[in-house]
């Protein structure tokens, strides 16, 4: 099969418009209405595909895998076999390695227009690709399921070997608009009573730690900027999604609100964890329309398996067997209030 070229596709239901690429399943723009009905683009990104292809973006908008987040020292053992991954983040392996799922062209399997417009991408990762075991067939479908709701369904089926699988959607959100400055005035409520604290190299220690009485507590609505100065350069932590209500098989993960536009994002997921990341390392990147993105200019809400779960027996397992299927769904419900 001839390799497809990286290109941009549009989903539009008349209220909401999504621009997404087959390169890394990357969301480059998402336009949603504010309290006055004005459309605004609420994701950080670039006007063309060139900066993505040239790897200027720190994972803007893409799906990362085969294993999202950090794997300690790029090593794990599965069924007695030790596997070695590329080291690309301090001493660790991050987001699937040097050429993870975010840096490959996916096949466009289906593109449906109309009310429930959707696009389905497929990718087949090979045995040994970026060090991971076994061939893996992956699909990702973005659907506009209602006037202001976006759904993402990710599936992965190992063909011949057990393998860790943990995909994450890495969009950088700013509900006031991608070019509106920092998200420190956004309020967040994260439905998690615990985090997985990390060591100096951002690898979880294995502890499941209560957030109560700490700067990490977002169990009730709080401004993102309220305690951010107490956590070093910002939030970059895995939250244990253990107290959100359930709806249609998904848990309420987070509610994010921008006070200026009154835009609200409610995110629902079936994943056990949420990486809450406040764009701490974004530093003067020139994005869409010449907007300059700085530190804390967005927030990432990456629902995921726990970081380094493959090496932490007390974390929920991310191993999928050849007869099994990895399924990860996310529903982004937008509104104004």
Image (tube, grey):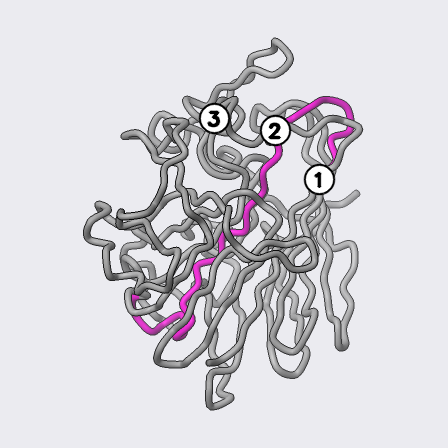
Mark 2 lies on residue: 164
Distance from label 2 to label 1 (Cα)?
Answer: 11 Å
Mark 2 crowd level (few <14, some 14–19, many ≥20, 10 Å Cα): many
Q: Where is residue 255 in the image (x, y as percent from the top left)?
A: 46, 64
Q: What element carries label 2?
A: strand
Q: Position of residue 192 (x, y in %)?
A: 45, 49
Mark 1 lies on residue: 156
The quarter holding residue 155 reads top right
* Nearer the observer, 207 or 245: 245
Distance from label 3 to label 1 (Cα)?
Answer: 21 Å
Mark 3 crowd level (few <14, some 14–19, many ≥20, 10 Å Cα): some
Mark 3 lies on residue: 86
Q: Is residue 87 left or right of residue 130?
A: left
* Nearer the observer, 228 or 33: 228
Q: Where is residue 174 in the image (x, y as percent from the top left)?
A: 40, 67
Tell which circle, 3 or 1, labels the residue nearer the N-terminal end. Answer: 3
Mark 1 crowd level (few <14, some 14–19, many ≥20, 10 Å Cα): many
Residue at figure coordinates x 42%, y 42% from the top left: 238
Report if residue 267 lies within the magenta region: no
């Amino acid at each position: 099969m001839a390799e497809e070229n990286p290109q941009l596709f549009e989903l539009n239901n008349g209220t909401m418009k999504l621009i997404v690429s087959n390169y890394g399943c990357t969301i480059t723009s998402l336009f949603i209405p504010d309290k006055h009905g004005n459309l605004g683009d609420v994701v950080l990104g670039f006007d063309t595909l060139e900066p993505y292809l040239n790897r200027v973006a720190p994972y803007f908008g893409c799906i990362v895998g085969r294993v999202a987040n950090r794997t300690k020292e790029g090593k794990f053992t599965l069924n007695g076999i030790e596997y070695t991954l590329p080291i690309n983040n301090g001493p660790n392996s991050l987001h699937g390695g040097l050429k993870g799922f975010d840096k490959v062209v996916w096949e466009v399997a289906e593109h449906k227009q109309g009310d429930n417009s959707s696009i389905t991408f497929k990718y087949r990762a090979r045995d040994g690709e970026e060090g991971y075991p076994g061939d893996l067939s992956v699909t990702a479908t973005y659907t506009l399921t209602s006037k202001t709701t976006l759904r993402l369904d990710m599936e992965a089926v190992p063909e011949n070997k057990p393998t860790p699988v943990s995909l994450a959607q890495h969009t950088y959100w700013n509900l006031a608009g991608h070019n509106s400055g920092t998200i420190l005035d956004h309020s967040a409520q994260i439905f998690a009573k615990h985090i997985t604290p990390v060591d100096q190299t951002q690898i979880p220690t294995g502890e499941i730690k209560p957030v109560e009485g700490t700067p990490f507590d977002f169990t009730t609505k709080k401004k993102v900027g309220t305690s951010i100065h107490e956590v070093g350069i910002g939030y970059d932590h895995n939250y244990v999604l253990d107290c959100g209500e359930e709806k249609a098989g998904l848990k309420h993960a987070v509610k994010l609100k921008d006070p200026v536009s009154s835009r609200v994002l409610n995110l629902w997921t079936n994943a056990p964890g949420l990486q809450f990341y406040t764009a701490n390392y974004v530093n003067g990147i020139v994005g869409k329309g010449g907007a300059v993105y700085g530190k804390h200019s967005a927030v990432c809400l990456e629902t995921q398996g726990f970081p380094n779960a493959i090496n932490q027996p007390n974390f929920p397992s991310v191993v999928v067997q050849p007869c099994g299927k990895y399924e990860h769904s996310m529903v982004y419900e937008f509104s104004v209030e």
